[in-house]
Amino acid sequence: QNLKLFCRFEEGKTIIFSSISNHGERARFFSDVVSTKICTGGARHDEVDFEFLGNVSGEPYILHTNIFSDGKGEREQQFVLWFDPTADFHTYSILWNPLNIILYIDGTPIRVFKNNEANGVPFPTRQPVHVFASIWNAEEWATQGGRVKTDWSEAPFVAAYRRFDATSACVWQGGASPARCGGDHLPSSASSWMAQRLDWWSWMTLNWVRMNYMTYDYCADRKRYPHAFPTECIIPIGRI
């Protein structure tokens, strides 16, 4: 599926657990947010975000990620990427299964959020989501902490997407379980996306991204959490 986005695109079906990818190109020269996300909606919503923050020409583009579960978010991680996201299309992927949520760019893992429900950390396993792509005005905070406002003279603001792929997903049609799953989804299968975790090389790659391109991690923000970090921050996420 190809589209040029002026406001918002929403996939009609709801899904629970998925491996989705979106081949996107961020628009140039404006101060709003371009996002791709999965979200349930509602006060106790689950949500996974890829968001490119507003940019002043000549400065690096910041990729903002966040994960909500049961209405609780504030799990921000930000990255300055190793490429110009406005120069060409890149593939932004979200793998969401009962074990973990993994965010990828062009097949490179940049973030992992593990299922730590056993340790009291909510994890999205019960609510179906929609897939969204949008441009929205976040001038209060998105560009230089809100110092730079949207320049409406630059309109129209356009982001281009192509090759949207949600074939590996469990489609929700009400009831207690998904009605149909696409792709190789059986947990007993070694190649199943429903059982996928990062292998050793992927953990090394993730560590490289974190060391070289991460600019903010809520799990390292002592001003925000002067007494104790959130529970998931003190549980090792893997071999890094």
Image (cartoon, rainbow, N blue to C red):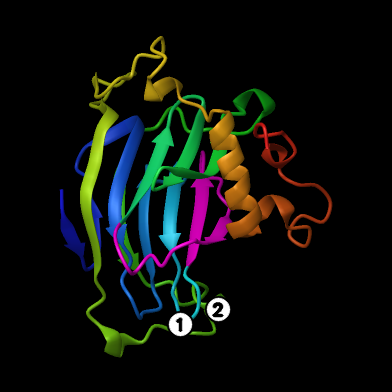
Q: Which residue is mark 2?
A: 144
Question: Does residue 75 appear in this view?
Answer: no
Q: Residue furthest top?
A: 188
Above or below, 163 against 182 in this view is below
Height in image: 1 above or below 235?
below
Residue at image mark 1: 56
For label 2, the SS is helix
Q: Is residue 81 magenta?
A: yes
Residue 105 image point, x, y percent = 42, 49
Tell me the number on the disc at residue 118. Answer: none
Quarter of the image where the C terminus is located: top right
Classed neighbour count for the residue bearing mark 1: other residues with Cα under 10 Å, few (<14), some (14–19), many (≥20): some
Query: Residue at point 47% right, 24% down?
Result: 98
Q: Mark 1 and mark 2: span between their CA atoms?
A: 9 Å
Picture coordinates of residue 158, whole percent (x, y): 24, 71
* Residue 234 showing in the rendered view: yes
Evaluate if marks 1 and 2 touch, with contact meaning CB atoms under 8 Å apart.
yes
Indicate the quadrant where residue 234 lies: top right
Number of marks: 2
Give whichever of 111, 8 is nearer the camera. 111
In the image, residue 168 lies in the stretch drawn in magenta: no
SS state under label 1? loop
Residue 80: image x %, image y %?
A: 53, 64
Q: Amino acid at mark 2?
A: Gln
Q: Position of residue 118 (x, y in %)?
A: 64, 22
Name which residue type carries label 1. Val
Is 166 displayed left or right of 106 in the figure? Answer: left
**Which residue lies at the image location 73% right of the left edge and 58% below the top edge?**
221
In the image, residue 200 sits, relative to residue 72, either above or below, namely above
The local crowd at label 2, few if under 14, some if 14 to 19, many if 20 or more residues have their Cα within 10 Å, is some
Q: In the rendered structure, which segment of residues is drawn in magenta?
A: 62-89
Outermost residue, bottom direction?
A: 153
